[in-house]
Image (cartoon, rainbow, N blue to C red):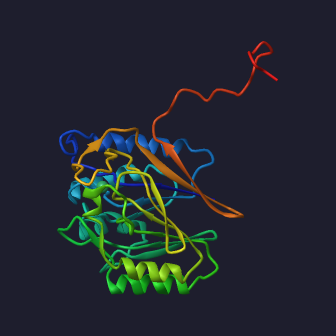
Amino acid sequence: MLIAQISDLHVRPAGQLAYGVSETNPFLERAVHALLRLDPAPDCVLVTGDITDCGLAEEYAIAAALLARLPCPVYCIPGNHDRREPFRAAFAPAGYLPAAGALNYVVDRGRVRIVALDSLVPGESGGALSPATLAFLRAALDDAPDRPTLVMLHHPPFETGIAHMDRVTLTAGRDGLEAIVSAHPQVERVLCGHVHRSIQTRFAGTIAQSAPSVAHQVAFDLRADGASCFVLEPPAFLVHRLGEAGVVTHEVEVDRAPGPFPFVLPADYPGRR
Ligand SMILES: [Fe+2]
């Protein structure tokens, strides 16, 4: 089973650029094409927040239309750039979102359970997991202890070393998340977005990781006084493969690279054995 994860789409109204630079709508279109090229195809696609840049209904309409090109289920969670009610209105037809309150939900795909958590705090860049959301997580994990489980939330529960991002991270509920995940060894991953970079770390006895953005990336800058900047490094996404031995995660670039070239050596290849 393959589960793709894209993140931080930051869709804008038609013709507008994010921060005056990033062509996020064409970026998403390229990501959708890349997902459609995957062979074998993913069973579903997770979208770990910042679907839109400003939470506008117009932005959600564009995002939903582009994501609707994917033939598999697509499961979205909100990020700090999203707004809860326009988000809910845009994706309610897919049927996985609750009708009211926090946008927490559970879906089962084959053997895998996906637990989606809403860390959005309106008006804030940082995020939080409320006591109710943590209780939702605990119940979802208690309910299916034998299912390999992916927990997803927008804000990473770990320090990245990118100082300006670490100042707008998960501000409440981190310890509760750690305690709950630690008590449930079926959690294969805690999947996040927000940082616009591919980052992995040990967390609560499992692996927590953030996905790169399919649009602009946060600049790699580990200086304590590093400025808040983005770069147009090649966009990418993650593909989580569930095999017999667990989950293995690949990072895949959105755009095609030259190749593939076969590993064939001609008879006169220097150094050939
Ligand atoms: Fe973002």
Q: Quadrant of the N terminus?
A: bottom right
User: Relative to 192, is 53 on the left or the right?
Assistant: left
Q: Is residue 98 above or below residue 229?
A: below
Q: Could you say which quadrant of the image residue 248 lies in?
A: bottom right
Q: Is residue 235 above or below residue 171?
A: above
What residue appears at the point 74 percent right and 24 percent down from the top-left corner?
A: 264
Q: Could you say which quadrant of the image residue 31 lies in?
A: top left
Q: Across the whole image, how many numbered discs are drawn on residues? A: 0
Q: Is residue 116 above or below residue 71?
A: below
| Residue placed most toward the observer, 25 or 219 | 219
What residue appears at the point 46 percent right and 49 percent down from the top-left corner?
A: 237
| Residue placed most toward the observer, 30 or 79 | 79
What residue appears at the point 39 percent right and 51 percent down from the top-left corner?
A: 197
Residue 148, x across and y down, in percent: 61, 72
In the rendered image, the residue lying farthest to the front is 224
Q: Is residue 253 above or below residue 42?
A: above
| Residue placed most toward the observer, 94 or 19 | 19
Residue 40, x across and y down, in percent: 63, 48
User: Relative to 30, is 41 on the left or the right?
Assistant: right
User: Relative to 32, is 245 on the left or the right?
Assistant: right
Q: Could you say which quadrant of the image residue 83 lies in?
A: bottom left
Q: Quadrant of the C terminus?
A: top right
Residue 58, x across and y down, in percent: 22, 54
Residue 218, x across and y down, in percent: 31, 48
Looking at the image, in which quadrant does ligand 1 appear? Answer: bottom left
